[in-house]
Image (cartoon, helix red, strand yellow):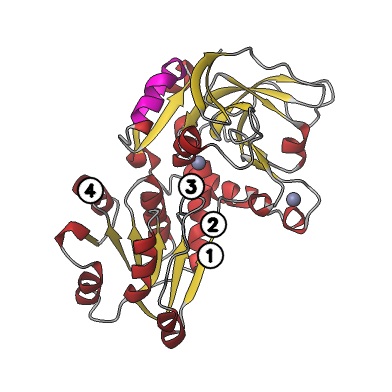
Amino acid sequence: MIAATYTQGGAFAIAEVPVPSIGEGELLVKVEATSLCGTDVKITRHGHRRLKPGQTIILGHEFVGTITKAGSKVTNFAVGERVGVVPNIGCGFCEMCGRGLMNMCPDYSAFGINMDGSHTEYVRITEATMAQGNVIKLSKTVSFIAAALAEPLSCAVNGIRVAGVEQGDFVLIYGAGPMGLLNLMLALLSGASEVFVVDMNDERLEKARSLGASRTFNPKLGSVADWVMNESGKRGVNVVITAAPSPEIQAEALKLLAPFGRLCLFAGLPTGSPPTAIDTNAIHYKNLIVTGMTGGAPQDYRTALRLIEAGRVDLSQVISHVLPISEVAKAYDLALAGQGMKIVLASREAMA
Ligand SMILES: [Zn+2]
Ligand SMILES: [Zn+2]
């Protein structure tokens, strides 16, 4: 089967690899839809700290599929079932895992990070993946292509909760890429009265407006802080979510917040970035909360999936390309060139 692979130390390749064999407690899942993510692109360029030197993995962690084989000891899943898989598998023993927060486990493994992932045709699902509740059955009717985005949406579910978006809030989102737009959709569902969106790309800003952003701004035109103060009647916004990896944005965000505002650092900076200098007096005098988050827990994934299954979010709006899995090389060409929004690889059946 064709696969996008990465070898720690710097080699990205499209390769022919064998279909994995499974143990008696494991599943084989045929990939029906799998999206590309900034993390995949980052790994092809910089590797990942969870990979051992020389280790090769199949990339891809956002995926749904159909069970085509189940080991003899598997009791909770059956061949033919449609499933989504939460990619981060915790150690199972630590306090974070005990709280169901596998995304916070200091010793996690993850599909497409240090275990073989989904930018291929079949994925082996380990026993631990099932035992931790990371394999989630999909309804018979949900589109595989939409459900593939349950994983990135689960990160936005986590981010919006951490940011504490409340009814009537003014929310500002930096970045109108796929993650910014998913945050926009969820901020509106959470009762934000207005969502402001900032991005350097006018086409993306237009997309944000079509999805319900009430005010948008391109920082090429001037100061974001002046714009926010004008547009908010000098009060500032209640929540800022940074869905763009920039230290300047992180520092600027504090100026935009009203008293008791919350800043959620949604996008991380590349590993090894120097610390960002921020105005701690803004935090002090305005009584601000500065917080962050990474990934989503299995429970966030379930929440995301329920929103998708109920049609509360229109994910087709953030998908720019759907390609057959055989065109995985083209999908990476597009992603590495920074083109489009979400790129999804799908099986022939899912595309039909
Ligand atoms: Zn991702
Ligand atoms: Zn753990």
Q: Which residues are magenta?
A: 321-334
Q: Point out the frontmost of discs 4 and 1.
A: 4
- Of residues 345 and 305, the one drawn nearer to the viewer in this rendering: 345
Q: Point out the frontmost of discs 3 and 4.
A: 4
| Mark 3 crowdedness (10 Å alpha carbons): few <14, some 14-19, many ≥20 | many
| Real-space CA distance between mark 4 and mark 2, rounded to the nearest whole angstrom | 26 Å
SS at badge 1: helix
Residue identified by numbered label 4: 201
Q: Quadrant of the C terminus?
A: top left
Q: Amino acid at mark 4?
A: Asn
- Which of the labelled discs sits on residue 153, or is there none? 3
Magenta-span inclusion, residue 202? no
| Real-space CA distance between mark 2 and mark 1, rounded to the nearest whole angstrom | 6 Å
Residue identified by numbered label 1: 162
Residue 309 visible? The answer is no
Residue 187: x and y, percent?
41, 61
Mark 1 vs ligand 1: CB under 8 Å? no
Residue at far bottom of view? 285
Q: Main secondary structure of the magenta part?
A: helix
SS at badge 3: helix
Q: Point out the frontmost of discs 4 and 2.
A: 4
Q: Name which of mark 4 and mark 1 comes first in the sequence.
A: 1
| Mark 4 crowdedness (10 Å alpha carbons): few <14, some 14-19, many ≥20 | some
Q: Amino acid at mark 2?
A: Asn
Give above or below for 270 relative to 164: above
Q: Name which of mark 3 and mark 2 comes first in the sequence.
A: 3
Q: Name which of mark 3 and mark 4 comes first in the sequence.
A: 3
Q: Are marks 4 and 1 in contact (CB under 8 Å)?
A: no
Q: Is residue 291 left or right of residue 29?
A: left
| Real-space CA distance between mark 3 and mark 2, rounded to the nearest whole angstrom | 9 Å
